[in-house]
Amino acid sequence: MIKVENLKKYFSTGMFSKKYVRAVDGLSFAIEKGETLGLVGESGCGKTTVGRLILRLIEPTEGKIFFKNTNILELNKKDLRKLRPKMQIIFQDPDSSLDPRMKIGESIAEPLKLYNIVSKNGREEKISELIEMVGLNPEHINRYPHELSGGQNQRAVIARILAINPKFIVADEPTSSLDVNVQAQMLFLLKKVREKFGLTCLFISHDLEVIKVMTDKIAVMYLGKLVEVGKTSDIFNGAVHPYTQALLSAIPVLDPEAKRKRIVLGGEIPNPINPPSGCSFHTRCPYRERICEIEEPMMIDIGDGHQVACHLNR
Amino acid sequence: MTLLSIQNLKVHFHTEDGAVRAVNDVDLVIEEGETLGLIGETGCGKTVLGLSILRLLSENTKVEGKILYKGKDLLKLNEGEMRKIRGKEIAMIFQNPLTSMNPVLTIGTQISEPFELHQGLKKKDAIQKVIAILKLVRIPSPSERINEYPHEFSGGMRQRAMIAMGLACEPSLILADEPTKGLDVTIQAQVVDLMKELTTNSKTSMLLITHDLGVAAELCDNIAVMYPGEIVEYADIKELFKNPKHPYTQGFLGSLPGRGLKPMNGMSPSLIDLPEGCKFHPRCPFARERCKNKRPEMVEIGKKHFVRCFLYD
C-alpha cells in the first residue's frame, strides 16, 4: 500500500552560514494493505516530519514515496488533489484541526461538499450517520469546537476524515493530549473504524504502551534514522537494538512489586544539525565499540522481517 | 510520625460560570518519609489540593478545614509566617518548569534565592551550594551552566533544575505536581530514578500529584484516588494495584493500555456541576437508587484500605 524509499528531509537554518537539520535521513519502509505500522521515537527524532512527508504536506529533499505503485512525488497538483481524499491525517491537537468558527456539523460537511461525495439532500443524513459512528450525540452537530471537550473534538475530526472514505491514515500522536480513560475510548474507536473501513495506518507515537496495543509492526526512529523494524510482538519480546531496549525498559511498569533492570540512558538526544559520526546512537549507547564511532551501521535483516541497524549484530 | 494532616478540607472558588467546588471534605495524612500519590484525571481538583497546602490560591478562594503541618494549622498562619514555610519546610515542584521559572534570571540566581532567603547565605556561598545541588541532580558541568538561562536548558534538564530548586533547603515535604509530564520516556526514566533516589533513603516526604499510574507505581508508598473533588479510595500501592475496590479505581486501571484498554462510559463531571449523592453514580455499572441521593462515607475495608462506596457498606 505504502512504500517509502530513501526518504530524506533537510531543513535549512541559519541566517548567514547555511546549516542543515537532518530531520529525516534516509528512511525506507513499507506498509501492507490493512496493516498498522507504529513509528516510535522521542521528541525531535523526526517522526512527525515523516508523517507529513508521506502525505506530501511538505516536500522531501530526496527519496520516493509510493501509494499503490504511484510515486506521489511525481504527481502534479491536479492529480495529487484527486489522491488527497484517499490519504488523511489525524493531528495531535484536535482543537486546532477544527475551524473555531464552524459548527461541528459544518466542519464534517466541508469535505462532503468539496469532493461532492453525497448529494446536497443526502448530506444531513450522512453527517448524522458519521456523528453516531464516532460516538457523538446528534446535539453536537450544532455546537462549536470550544463547547466540546478535547476527546469529543478528536471524535469530530475522525468523523470528518471518515466522510471521504480514506484508504490510508496517518495518526500523529492522536491521544497524547487526552486523559487515560478518554484515551482508551479513542483508541477503541480507532480500532473499530480501522476494522470497519479496512484502513491502512501509520501510527506515530512516543507512548510504547499505546503502540503495543495498536500496531502490527513497529519502526523505531532515532535522530532521523530507523534503528529497528519488526513485528510488534517480536520487538516487545526481543528487541535487539540497544536504543529500543532502553526505550522499552523506560516504560513505567504498572506493578509496584515488579523487579527489573532498567537501562537508563545517560545524556540527551544530540543536535540533529550536527549528528554524531558513525552510529548516531553511539554517544548514549552502553555497549559502544570503536567501530560505532567511525562507521555507520547498515540495516540488516535478522529473520522474519526483523531488521536492525547495529554493529553488535553482525 | 505524622508530618501533614489534612482534615475536612474544602476549597471553593467563584468564576463567571459558577461556583467551582474543587475540593470537598478531603482527609489525608502524610507520615514522615512517606511518598503519597494523589491520582486523578484532568480537572478532578488534585492540583488545587496541592496549591491549597502552600496557600498559593487566589484571594477569592474559600478554604475551610484544617491543614496541620507538624501540628500547626497552616490556614491560620499570617503571610509572614507562611513565607518561612514555603520553600524551606514545604517545597513545590511544578509541572511546567518553563513557565514556573523566571526567564530573565540565570539558573544560578534562581536556585540561589532560597539559600539567601532562608539560610541567610551570601551570594558567593549560595552559588557554591547551587553548584553542589545541580551536581546532585546530574546537570553536566554545573559551574558553567549556572550562568545559563532557563531557555538554554533542555526539557529534562529544566525539570531536574526545578527539582534542585525544590530540594535546595532540604524541605520536610515536597509537593510534586506532575513532575514528569511532557518528558520523553528515557528522560522521564532519568527523572523518576532521581526522585526515587532522593526520597527512598531520606526523611523527606512527598505528595506526588499525577495521572500517570506507572510513575506512581515506581515512587509511591500509598495512593489516594481522587474523583472530582473527593478521595474515593486510599490504600497502599501494592494493595491498590492488586485489589482495587472502588468501581472508579477499577475502571481507571482497566482503561490503561497495559491492563486491558477497556474504557469507562462517559466523562468525569465538571467541578461546577457535580452530581448529587455519589459523584461516580452516573457512570457506575453498580449504581443503585441510594447512590443517587446519598453521599457514601469513607469505610475501612482492610488494613489501611479505605473506600467511599456503598458496595462495601
Image: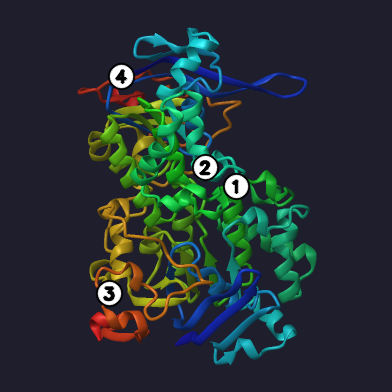
- Residue hosting label 3: B287
- Compared to residue B16, the image places residue B293 above or below, namely below
Q: Amino acid at mark 3?
A: Ala
The kind of secondary structure element at disc 3 is loop
- Residue hosting label 4: A300
- Residue hosting label 1: B140
Letter of the chain that mark 2 sits on in the rendering: A
Image colouring: rainbow
The residue sitting at 61% across, 66% down in the picture is B166
Q: Amino acid at mark 2?
A: Gly
Q: Amino acid at mark 4?
A: Ile
- Disc number placed over residue B242 in the picture, else none: none
For the residues tagged 4 and 3, is the chain the same?
Answer: no
Q: CA distance from mark 2 to mark 1?
A: 9 Å
Q: Quadrant of residue B298?
A: bottom left
Name which of mark 4 and mark 2 comes first in the sequence. Answer: 2
